[in-house]
Image: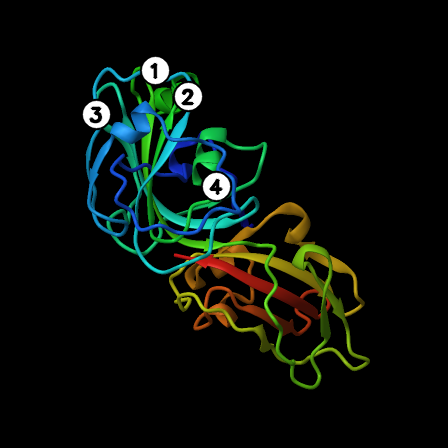
Amino acid sequence: MRRHILPATAALALLLVGATTGCSSAPQLDRTDCGPALSEGSLSNSVKVEGKAGSVPKVTVPKGVSIDDSQRTIASHTGDSTSVARDGALLSINMQAIDAETGQTVHQSQRMGTENPSEFVLLKKGSGIPALTDGLRCTAPGDRVVVAMEPKESAQLLEQSGAKPGGSVVFIVDVLAVRNTGNVASPGTLPSGFPAVTNLDSGRPGIVLPPQAAPKSTKTATRIEGDGLRVTADNNVIAQVLTVDWDGQEQNNTWTTGPVGLGNEAQMSQSGVTFRKELTGLRVGSQVVIMEPQASGKATVSVVDILAAG
């Protein structure tokens, strides 16, 4: 079974957001054409965070600062990326969540302090925990972000972690990668014998099958070359997938349901993702076409957009 990537949710283990301090010596990135959903405020601006994205943060949350509305502050920005997260983007992050009343950490990503993401968040309007998705909107790779979540919205997370509700949760998030899922790069030419792939609305692909016999072995071709990190065998891969059988019947289309987790190579028997090995060695951001021979059913063709890996 494939794991769906959820928008930011109340489950502690799935929280995907971060927080940073209110020092504002961050290099300026042009975000003028992206309107953030949250503004800076008294709590998000007064959280002190030492260190930049990718390092272990030393965080001091001030006592006695109460808020009525959630806030966010971009504490620092490193790197030269200009990819700003918009609605529908998939972000690769590490994060730490802190109970503002006690200063205790209630959740921390396994790889916090590294540039290898532990978690992913899909910015989808109107779903998940609004403060988390709103707090990451208009961020960019290299940002360390402080999101201060108002007490009412913080209550469920605090209860799940065994803490007393009533105060705010402060998130420190390192934004490691941003993939705006509607973007379509210029495709290359596929080898002879592969189906034609077209771009439909909002970057969704369409498949035109060739007038020939079904494949007898697995074949893979890259249609769009990505520029992200290379996928390793033990990476969990997040992707968009369109699969049709050799009669042209649609078997799977995540462009209508949302990105899915394809797991790593060791999880293939459990996940049922028979083409996972074909993604190893490719770069995040790539789009590949995979033809698989008939197994228990008909031969299939899959178009896979690799959105993230970690």
| Image height of 300 relative to 141, above or below | below
Q: Which residue is mark 1?
A: 165
* Image coloring type: rainbow
As measured in the structure, the alpha-carbon distance from the residue carrying label 4 to the one carrying label 1 is: 26 Å
Which label belongs to residue 32? Answer: none
Residue 190 vertical placement versus 53 (above, below): below
Q: Quadrant of residue 274?
A: bottom right
Disc 2 marks a residue whose amino acid type is Gln
> Closest to the observer: 12 or 203?
203
Q: Is residue 224 above or below residue 25?
A: below
Residues at circles 3 and 1 in contact by the CB criterion of under 8 Å: no
Residue at 25% x, 18% y is: 101
The quadrant in which residue 294 appears is bottom right
Q: Earlier in the sequence, mark 3 or mark 2?
A: 3
- Of labels 3 and 1, earlier in sequence is 3
* Residue that carries the numbered disc 3 in the rendered image: 103
- As helix, strand or loop, the secondary structure at mark 4 comes to loop
Please state which of residues 110 and 78 is positioned toward the viewer in this rendering: 78
Q: Which is more N-terminal, label 2 or label 4?
A: 4
Residue 99 spot, x, y in % from top left:
28, 24
The Cα atoms of the two marked residues, 4 and 3, are separated by 26 Å
Q: Nearer the viewer, residue 91 or 20?
A: 20
Q: Residue furthest bottom?
A: 192
Callout 2: SS: helix
Quadrant of the rendering where the C terminus is positioned? bottom left
> Which residue is painted at 27% across and 34% down in the image?
22
Report how many numbered discs are placed on residues in the image.
Answer: 4
- Residue 153, by quadrant, is top left
For the residues labelled 4 and 2, the Cα–Cα distance comes to 22 Å
Determine crowd level at label 4: few under 14, some 14-19, many 20+ residues with C-alpha closer than 10 A.
many
